[in-house]
Amino acid sequence: MALVGINHVALEVGSIDEALAFWEGLFGPLQLRGRSGSMAFVDMGDQFVALMRAPHGEPDTVRHVGIVVDDKDAVRVSAVTAGVDVSRPPSLDLHDPWGNLLQVVDYREIQFTKAPEILAGMGLAGLEKNDSALGELRARGWAGVWRRRCLTPVTV
């Protein structure tokens, strides 16, 4: 198993509306991946920042980092073997010894995409996207969607 990248960072905020206004004031118009009363997901290409309203008086309850790996199941086995408490499948959330929440996601299941040359350099040349992730990339209209079993970019 190997680390592949960071999928997202989740930040706690007091107000979703105020947080979105702050971000727009800094970065201009935002593209939202989704929004609810307590969360907003700000797109940054194939990555995102999650803004999450923190329960009053309970800081640091939803702040986390989304870690991309090449084999989430192998990470689950390693964590359980090490005695680390993990969430139930299909998600894989765990805390490090200092209390940091890590949300582990599988590269094959998400939009986040590394260039073929980077994957090859990391020793992950055969890493594929699943149909769901490919569908998300197609729905976004992004050219260069990678075929599941090939590093050659294709237009879909």
Image (cartoon, rainbow, N blue to C red):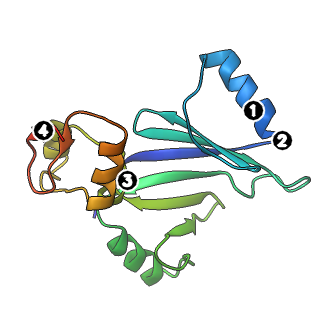
Q: Which is more toward the observer, 84 or 138? A: 138
Position of residue 87 relative to residue 107, above or below, is: below
Q: Dot 1 surroundings within 10 Å: few (below 14), some, or many (20 or more)? A: some
Which dot marks residue 153? 4
Q: Mark 2 is on which residue type?
A: Gly
At 50% from the left edge and 52% from the top edge, which residue is drawn? 66
CA gap between label 4 and label 3 equals 17 Å
Q: Amino acid at mark 1?
A: Ala
**For marks 3 and 1 on the same chain, the one whose residue lies earlier in the sequence:** 1
Q: Earlier in the sequence, mark 3 or mark 2?
A: 2
Q: Hey, what amino acid is under mark 3? A: Ile
Marks 4 and 2, how far apart at CA = 42 Å
Reply above or below: 93 against 153.
below
Q: CA distance from mark 4 to mark 1?
A: 37 Å
Q: Nearer the viewer, mark 4 or mark 2?
A: 4
Instruction: Give the percent coordinates (x, y) of residue 125.
Output: 12, 51
Tell me where residue 127 sits by quadrant: bottom left
The residue positioned 38% from the left and 79% from the top of the image is: 77
Label at residue 19? 1
**Residue 123: mark in rendering:** none
Residue that badge 3 annotates: 110
The residue identified by callout 2 is: 14
Secondary structure found at label 4? strand
Discs 2, 1 touching: Cβ within 8 Å: yes
